[in-house]
């Protein structure tokens, strides 16, 4: 399993990262929202439904995927 792109592990989610989240109201439909992490809200190292974050635009949700930018290293 590639844990670097797994939104269930806190160690994989960094402030400033681009991620896809599911907001609480979108859980049934599965609609995801893309944004940049401003703050990590989950304190545990692992959460089975995804680490909860606040995006720069204020939206809050659980990370479903971390977007890898191939042009950025470091």
Image (spheres, rainbow, N blue to C red):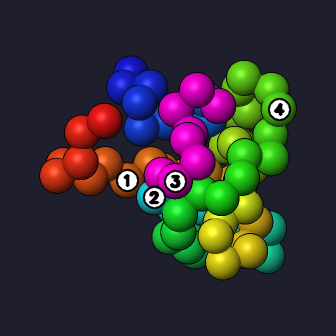
- Could you tell whether 56 is left or right of 45 in the image? left
The answer for how far apart the CA atoms under marks 4 and 3 are is 17 Å
**Nearer-the-camera pick, 42 or 57:** 57
Marks 1 and 3 close (CB-CB < 8 Å): no
Q: Is residue 32 magenta?
A: no
Marks 3 and 2 close (CB-CB < 8 Å): no
- Give the residue at x 75% y 66%: 60
Label disc, if present, on residue 16 of the rendered structure: 3
The answer for how far apart the CA atoms under marks 4 and 2 are is 19 Å
- Could you tell whether 14 is left or right of 51 in the image? left
Question: Residue 54 is drawn in which quadrant?
Answer: bottom right
Residue 3, horizontal then vertical, whole percent:
44, 26
Q: Is residue 48 above or below residue 29?
A: above
| SS assignment at label 3 | loop
Give the prevailing secondary structure in the magenta stretch.
loop
Q: Which residues are magenta?
A: 10-17
Marks 1 and 2 close (CB-CB < 8 Å): yes
Question: Residue 30 is drawn in which quadrant?
Answer: bottom right
Marks 4 and 1 close (CB-CB < 8 Å): no
Q: Nearer the viewer, mark 3 or mark 2?
A: 3
| SS assignment at label 1 | loop
For marks 4 and 3, the one nearer the N-term is: 3
Label disc, if present, on residue 18 of the rendered structure: 2
Residue for badge 1: 67
The answer for how far apart the CA atoms under marks 1 and 3 are is 11 Å
Marks 4 and 2 close (CB-CB < 8 Å): no
The answer for how far apart the CA atoms under marks 1 and 2 are is 5 Å
Quadrant for the N terminus, please: top left
């Amino acid at each position: 399993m590639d844990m670097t792109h797994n939104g269930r592990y806190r160690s994989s989610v960094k402030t400033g990262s681009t991620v896809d989240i599911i907001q609480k109201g979108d859980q049934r439909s599965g609609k995801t929202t893309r944004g940049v992490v401003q703050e990590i809200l989950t304190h545990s190292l692992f959460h089975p439904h995804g680490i909860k974050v606040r995006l720069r635009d204020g939206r809050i949700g659980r990370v479903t995927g971390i977007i890898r930018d191939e042009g950025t290293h470091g």
